[in-house]
Amino acid sequence: MDDADQERQKQSVGRYAARYVEDGMRVGLGTGSTVRWTILALAERGLHLMCVATSVETQKLALENGLEVLTPGEVGSLDIAIDGADEVDPAFNLIKGGGGALAREKIVASMTDHFVVVVDESKSCPHLGAFPLPVEVLEFGADIVATRLRDLGADDVIRRPVVSDNGNPILDAGFGRIDDPAALTSELEAIPGIVEHGIFPGSMVRRVVAARGDDVVELSRSQET
Ligand code: 5RP
């Protein structure tokens, strides 16, 4: 798939997912080049929505297009949240955070029982891990966390040159194939200094809207990973 095909797929799935949003809803807006199309489609429909943005970039896009943006505390919970992903496995476990917004994205996803993921065809995979796992850390512990990630099996841990919207460093940890995302999640959550990591459990995800060639399909979840 070339870049133009991929961009077409992002546009199709992003726009498709706007259909789940109705007037008056409280909506979580994800970050990235796929959900960008959802945000534009929502703005075009002229709905009155109360939105929570997962990044400064998304907040700017939403405001520029006439959407109202509130804080998580102001809305309390969300009717729906829509976001992209870097990898999706058959059980709907995700790796997210390629755009560095993982911490806010996970908070927003946790505020709803209708979390919709929009992905082009390249994001579906039998096992997570080919995409390096983003891990947001406190500056004070960044080197120690990097060592712990290597102890857990990451053969490459690279610090991004820019910090997150929260002002924290992000490490990209190359674990390779992750056979048990839940087990790795528990291990990561036991490391002091990690603010958030990019494994989102399948239990958070209600729907995955994916491109397949020129079509858009809603994937069925399989418990096998
Ligand atoms: C940002 C994310 C994005 O959702 C993820 O990187 C996918 O982005 P794109 O839709 O541009 O491929 O997690 O932190």
Image (cartoon, helix red, strand yellow):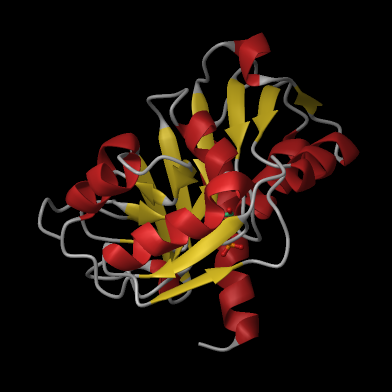
Residue at the extreme left of the image, as rendered = 224
The image shows residue 11, relative to residue 91, as above or below, that is below
Q: Measuring 10% from the left and 57% from the top, which residue is drawn there?
A: 224
The image shows residue 129, relative to residue 140, as above or below, that is below
Q: Looking at this view, is 109 or 149 the one in front?
A: 149
x and y percentages locating residue 202 in the rendered image: 27, 44
Find ligand 1 in the image and state its quadrant.
Answer: bottom right
x and y percentages locating residue 171 in the rendered image: 53, 61
Toward which corner of the image does residue 114 lie, by quadrant? top left
Q: Measuring 44% from the left and 54% from the top, which residue is drawn there?
A: 145
x and y percentages locating residue 184 in the rendered image: 24, 53
Quarter of the picture containing the C terminus is bottom left
Q: Looking at this view, is 202 or 27 the one in front?
A: 202
Answer whether residue 20 is visible to the viewer in this image: no
Q: Measuring 58% from the left and 41% from the top, which residue is drawn there?
A: 18
x and y percentages locating residue 201 in the rendered image: 29, 43
- Looking at the image, residue 225 sits to the left or right of residue 174; the answer is left
Q: Measuring 44% from the left and 41% from the top, which residue is drawn there?
A: 116
The image shows residue 134, relative to residue 17, as above or below, that is below
